[in-house]
Amino acid sequence: MSEVFIGHSSKDKLVADAIVKALECEGISCWIAPRDVLAGTNYGAEIIKGIRNCSILVLVFSENSNTSTAIFREVQKAFAEQKIIIPLRIQNVPVSDDLDFYISGLHWLDANPRDHNYSDLIRVVRRLLNPPKPTTAKPPAKAALKQEAPKAGKGLFGFLFNSKNTEPENFPDNVQPCATLHLLEDGEPIQEIPINKNPFVLGRNRDQADYTFESEDDKRIGRTHAVINRDGHRYYIIDKQSRNGTLLNGVKIEPDKPVPLEDGMIIRIGRRNLRFQLHD
């Protein structure tokens, strides 16, 4: 089983082979056609197996792949399988309508022609394959048990299990939020959304959500679709059992399970993409 599937046009084989060499030299296993297609097997079926068995699809984006029907099908399959898709741009061309739905809202990497080792790609792939685990707070000392217990909702799990009794923690007006969301359109930010409450609710119910989406997304977005919660210096996103789910970097997260947010991650809710950004 390979960790990374390399989606590329056959006309970009030299670049794709160089990417595979750089990744595999760092111990990251790759699947690439035609190298990994067994002789005598169905070519299309092997492609599907390669995508299904990987964790990440790296799309070598160029003028050639942008107009390739085969590449469109690979990206479509990876999206359906909820794989992480990393568009690696080697040519600056407008995204075709076929690919636009699947990759326009994702965070792109631009290949550096001077970096033959693809160090940026390796760094991102490693981080996605081995995301940092949330730190677990140490239990309080026995002496501290005599102190007044914290109010429900102040910690990460207080909101999960005591949401009915939780009052949002509003940040003072003179305090700059430590994180923001950027609403994306065609991969570019069109609106900055400060995360100025804890918890911060995303949805379509104006009475319950701290940020509401436009009416065109109502059918795909729940009343309280997802929540962003801060615990110390860490942020987490929680899908509140929404009908269509919440995607993080192209992967659907489990309902009611806190997932740590890292700078630059893409949150997809309905048809909308939001980029999470931490501030110093």
Image (cartoon, rainbow, N blue to C red):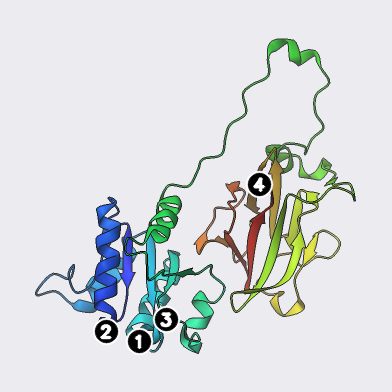
**Residue 43 seen in the current view:** yes
Which residue does the image show at 22% across and 73% down from the upper left? Answer: 33
- Distance between the Cα atoms at labels 3 and 2? 13 Å
**Mark 4 or mark 3: which is in front?**
3
The quadrant in which residue 277 appears is bottom right
Mark 2 sits on what residue?
A: 11
Q: Going by the picture, which residue comes out furthest to the left?
A: 40
Q: Going by the picture, which residue comes out furthest to the front?
A: 114
Mark 1 sits on what residue?
A: 64
| Crowd around label 4: few <14 · some 14–19 · many ≥20 (10 Å) | many
Residue 42 horizontal/vertical position (percent): 18, 77
Mark 4 sits on what residue?
A: 235
Image-based side of 236 in relation to 83, left or right: right
N-term-proximal mark, 2 vs 1: 2
| Crowd around label 1: few <14 · some 14–19 · many ≥20 (10 Å) | some
Are the two marked residues, 1 and 3, in contact with CB atoms closer than 8 angstroms? no
Are the two marked residues, 2 and 1, in contact with CB atoms closer than 8 angstroms? yes
Q: Amino acid at mark 3?
A: Gln
N-term-proximal mark, 4 vs 3: 3
- Distance between the Cα atoms at labels 4 and 2? 42 Å
> Which mark is on residue 91?
3
